[in-house]
Image: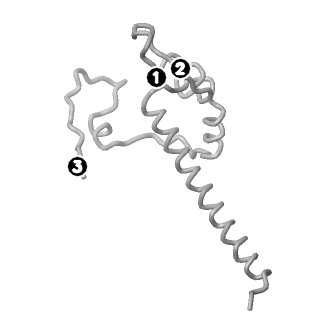
Amino acid sequence: MRVFHRRSRVPDRIGPERPSAGARESGAVAPVGAVNGYAVLETVAALPVSTWRYLWEPEDVRHLGPMAQDWHAAFGFNQDDTKIPVVDGLGVALVCVQALHRRVEELTAEVERLREAASVHTPEAT
């Protein structure tokens, strides 16, 4: 597996509105709060998904995904309802994968409990 390291970038200007290079390079983020993966999963399940193309693309080009306006209405992560930021799409996908994994684990445990209960109540053949 090849690992790529972040390259440092020299800022074009330094001002109070920009984070320091040290904070940026350390990967520091301001955590906001926990996310309910099941709620995000339900939101994604209800999100309309369709095929579309950019106006400047040929008629036969198609992309698959939600419309930015629907995404914004569902999640409201940013002020812009004309784009879906890649980082938000990846974050939502990761939270959904985690929620699905937890659900599979819960269902697997339930199946095991049911199998054990069935084997206790089923008389063995002689």
Label 2 with label 1: CB-CB less than 8 Å: no
Near-viewer residue (70 or 109): 109
Mark earlier in primary sequence (3, 1): 3
Residue 123 position (above or below residue 22): below
Tell which tag, 3 or 2, sits nearer the viewer. Answer: 3
Q: Secondary structure at mark 1?
A: strand
Residue at 58%, 50% (x, y): give it: 100
Mark earlier in primary sequence (3, 2): 3
Q: Position of residue 69 (x, y in %)?
A: 58, 19
Q: CA distance from mark 3 to mark 1?
A: 30 Å
Q: Which residue is mark 1?
A: 63
Please, what is the three-letter code of the amino acid marked with disc 2? Answer: Gln
The quadrant of the picture occupied by the C terminus is bottom right
Q: Residues within 10 Å of mark 3 (few under 14, many from 20)?
A: few
Q: Position of residue 74 (x, y in %)?
A: 62, 28
Q: CA distance from mark 2 to mark 1?
A: 23 Å
Q: Residues within 10 Å of mark 1 (few under 14, many from 20)?
A: few
Q: Which residue is mark 3?
A: 2
Q: Quadrant of residue 4?
A: top left
Tell which tag, 3 or 1, sits nearer the viewer. Answer: 1
Q: Residues within 10 Å of mark 2 (few under 14, many from 20)?
A: few
Mark earlier in primary sequence (2, 1): 1
Please, what is the three-letter code of the amino acid marked with disc 3? Answer: Arg
Q: Is residue 78 left or right of residue 27?
A: right
Q: Quadrant of residue 42?
A: top right
Q: Which residue is mark 2?
A: 79
Label 3 with label 1: CB-CB less than 8 Å: no
Please, what is the three-letter code of the amino acid marked with disc 1? Answer: His
Residue 17 position (above or below residue 124): above
Near-viewer residue (85 or 12): 85
Q: Is residue 26 left or right of residue 108?
A: left
Residue at 45%, 40% (x, y): give it: 30
